[in-house]
């Protein structure tokens, strides 16, 4: 068996900062989709003067 190096691939060491990965990108995409949905909801509710129901 080979010995493992202390600097293994995919994991940052104690002194190293981990860079953004695919999950951070997906988090940004989902956050921007939520913000866009909230903005469109506010714009739609302004056309009804914030009157809900009948």
Image (cartoon, grey):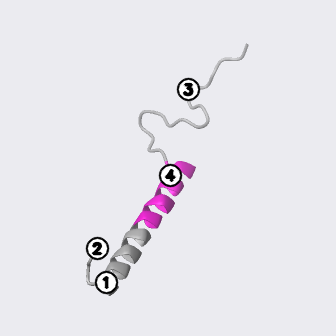
Q: Is residue 3 above or below residue 19?
A: above
Compare marks 2 and 3 and give the one earlier in the sequence: 3
Residue 25: in magenta span: yes
Front position in the image: 30 or 49: 49
Horizontal side of residue 22 vs 28, given as left or right:
right
Circle 2 is placed at which residue position? 52
| Residue at point 50%, 49% (across, down) | 19
Mark pair 3, 1: CA separation = 62 Å
Disc nearest the viewer among 2 and 3: 2
Mark pair 2, 3: CA separation = 60 Å
Instruction: Point out residue 14 in the picture as x, y percentages from the top left corner.
Output: 42, 33
> Which quadrant would the C terminus be assigned to in this image?
bottom left
Instruction: Point out residue 4 in the picture as x, y percentages from the top left corner.
Output: 63, 22
Q: Residue furthest top?
A: 1
Circle 1 is placed at which residue position? 48
Query: Pointer 2: residues within 10 angstroms few (<14), some, or many (20+)?
Result: few
| Residue at point 48%, 45% (across, down) | 18
Q: Secondary structure at mark 1?
A: loop
Task: Point out which mark residue 20 bears.
Answer: 4
Front position in the image: 54 or 38: 54
Circle 3 is placed at which residue position? 6
For residue 41, which quarter of the picture?
bottom left
Q: Secondary structure at mark 4?
A: loop
Dominant secondary structure (helix, strand or loop) of the stretch shown in magenta: helix
Q: Is residue 5 above or below residue 22?
A: above
Q: Secondary structure at mark 3?
A: loop
Query: Pointer 3: residues within 10 angstroms few (<14), some, or many (20+)?
Result: few
Q: Secondary structure at mark 2?
A: loop
Mark pair 4, 2: CA separation = 42 Å
Instruction: Point out residue 44 in the picture as x, y percentages from the top left corner.
Output: 37, 80
Contact check, label 3 and label 4, Cβ < 8 Å:
no
Compare marks 3 and 1 and give the one earlier in the sequence: 3
């Amino acid at each position: 068996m080979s010995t493992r190096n202390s600097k293994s691939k995919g994991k940052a060491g104690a002194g190293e900062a981990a860079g953004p990965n695919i999950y951070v990108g997906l988090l940004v995409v989902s956050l921007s989709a939520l913000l866009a949905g909230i903005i469109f909801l506010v714009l739609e509710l302004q056309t009804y003067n914030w009157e809900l129901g009948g």
